[in-house]
Image (cartoon, rainbow, N blue to C red):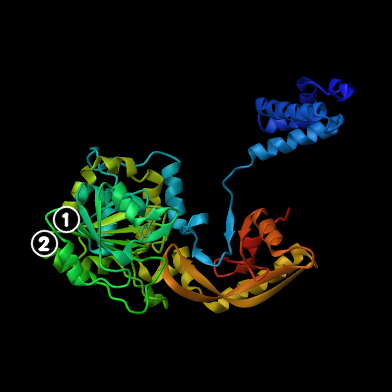
């Protein structure tokens, strides 16, 4: 151990008098700077005691303190540019919100707002009424409630209508969405008894008929969001399930997952069932996410029969799962865009990315390539290639959209190293690795300017 090195360490007070740290104090706080200096000194002291290092110079201690401080002050929430090849990517927050939704959230955040008050009378209101009228209009439902996410919507609907009773569902629909949403677990956690019917690939009307008994409270149909069963298959459509349910007096719930509000085929995209169709075909309640194909903030929407929604509102779990004011503000502004379907594909980023013409994606790719060649330098080679985008968020499984992507390789760095370097840049860029190359899908990158990247 180097006793002199230990004795030579400056005191906190001495360090804080250094002009660099003085400046840091003026932009953050004296307590934080002192905390960082103390932590740095402790670290150095134990390294000296264990003989791992000698005494540092004052400049080194100051630099270490500043580095520690800037790490502490750096926000955890950072912008990520989505070049991942998945439009609705759960790990980076799914749907990018419209400007309208972002403005509405800012308004709700920066002051008080009419969350649960009727501004006409001053009386207490119901927070869901901020969006219920729009949901009714856009889906044909009699009523609607909003919670935190679709997993909560399914949980709440099942718990309200079927606690202690049986939920009948086809074996082929017991899906796992990822992020630990497993339908069988959600059914159990909502206090219901799972009654699976049919086989994995085939379920027939008779299977439902045979399972329904005096203890049956719900028929549940789930959209098999992220997989498809092909080959020798058969499932029972909503119309038929609805008539089985009616005959036995058992309500039918459809968990649509993504739940589009418009027929996507008008934008040249594959057809996905809409909430309106589900209600027209006889679902008594439909549950769907706010941040998948709908293109809004994270939310779960339950739409359907007024009598059932009223029961759901009275459930104390609704209080625990309710959406907050920012979500409701963003959701309302998003739903409002649907009143004008002609402009929807301009206004709603999720839809704009899905409907984006290949020529425009290619133009962005050409610009981005020039830009990145400049930033990354001659060690890198960047080519533009045909590739495919997936919709994500469990929407339209197996349907891929043609796209243009940048493929990046480097003379000295492996793909993993390039991938992580792009992720730790500012802003972070999320690509993917394919055959030892980093692929940046340009469908979801608005322009080369978005990549205004500073590499570390
Ligand atoms: C995505 C999905 C869910 C979960 O929705 P979250 O909004 O992520 O909670 C539930 N059911 C289905 C069928 C889904 O696709």
Name which residue lies at 46% across and 53% down: 102
Q: Is residue 5 above or below residue 125?
A: above
> CB atoms at circles 1 and 2 under 8 Å apart?
yes
Residue pictured at 52% horizontal, 55% vertical: 92
Ligand 1's image quarter is bottom left
Number of callouts? 2
Position above or below: 269 against 279: below
**Which quarter of the rendering shows the N terminus?**
top right
Q: Relative to residue 130, is residue 142 depicted above or below? A: below
Q: Is residue 66 above or below residue 432?
A: above
Q: Nearer the viewer, residue 394 or 216?
A: 216
Sequence-earlier tag: 1 or 2: 1
Residue bearing the label numbered 2: 248
Q: Is residue 130 visible?
A: no
Looking at the rendered structure, the secondary structure element under dot 2 is helix
Answer few, some or many: residues within 10 Å of disc 2's Cα (few below 14, many 20 plus, some between 14 and 19): some
Q: Give me the disc on residue 216.
A: 1
Label 1 to label 2, Cα distance in Å? 9 Å
From the viewer's side, name the closer residue of 74 and 195: 195
Viewer-proximal residue among 361 and 429: 429
């Amino acid at each position: 151990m180097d006793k002199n090195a230990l004795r030579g360490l400056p005191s906190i007070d001495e360090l804080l008098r250094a002009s660099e740290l003085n400046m840091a104090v003026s932009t953050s706080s004296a307590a934080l700077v002192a905390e960082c200096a103390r932590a740095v000194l402790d670290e150095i002291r134990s390294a000296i005691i264990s003989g791992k290092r000698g005494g540092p110079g004052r400049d080194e201690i100051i630099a270490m303190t500043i580095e520690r401080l800037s790490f502490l002050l750096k926000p955890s929430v950072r912008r990520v540019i989505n070049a991942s090849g998945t439009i609705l990517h759960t790990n980076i927050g799914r749907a990018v919100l419209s400007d309208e939704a972002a403005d509405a959230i800012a308004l709700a955040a920066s002051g008080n707002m009419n969350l649960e008050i009727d501004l006409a009378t001053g009386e207490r209101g119901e927070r869901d009424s901020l969006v219920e009228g729009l949901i009714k209009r856009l889906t044909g439902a009699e009523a609607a409630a909003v919670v935190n996410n679709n997993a909560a919507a399914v949980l709440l609907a099942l718990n309200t209508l079927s606690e202690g009773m049986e939920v009948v569902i086809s074996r082929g629909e017991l899906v796992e969405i990822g992020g630990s949403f497993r339908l069988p677990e959600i059914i159990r956690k909502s206090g219901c008894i799972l009654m699976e019917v049919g086989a994995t690939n085939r379920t027939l009307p008779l299977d439902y008929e045979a399972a329904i008994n005096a203890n049956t409270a719900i028929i549940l149909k789930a959209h098999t969001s992220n997989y498809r069963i092909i080959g020798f298959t058969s499932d029972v459509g909503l119309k038929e399930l609805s008539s089985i349910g009616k005959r036995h007096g058992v309500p039918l719930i459809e968990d649509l997952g993504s739940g589009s509000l418009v027929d996507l085929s008008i934008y040249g995209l594959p057809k996905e069932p809409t909430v309106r169709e589900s209600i027209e075909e006889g679902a008594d309640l439909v549950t769907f996410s706010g941040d998948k194909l709908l293109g809004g903030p994270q939310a779960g929407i339950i739409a359907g029969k007024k009598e059932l929604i009223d029961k759901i509102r009275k459930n104390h779990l609704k209080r625990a799962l309710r959406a907050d004011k920012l979500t409701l503000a963003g959701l309302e502004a998003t739903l409002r865009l649907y009143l004008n379907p002609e402009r929807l594909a301009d206004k709603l980023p999720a839809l704009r990315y899905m409907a984006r013409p290949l020529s425009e994606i290619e133009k962005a790719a050409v610009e981005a390539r020039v830009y990145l060649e400049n930033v990354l330098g001659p060690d890198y080679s960047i080519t533009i290639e045909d590739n495919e985008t997936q919709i994500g968020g469990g929407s339209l499984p197996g349907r891929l959209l043609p796209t243009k992507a940048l493929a990046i390789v480097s003379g000295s760095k492996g793909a993993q190293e390039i991938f992580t370097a792009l992720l730790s840049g500012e802003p972070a860029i999320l690509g993917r690795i394919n055959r030892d190359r980093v692929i940046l899908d340009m469908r979801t990158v608005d322009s080369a300017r978005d990549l205004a990247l500073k590499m570390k």
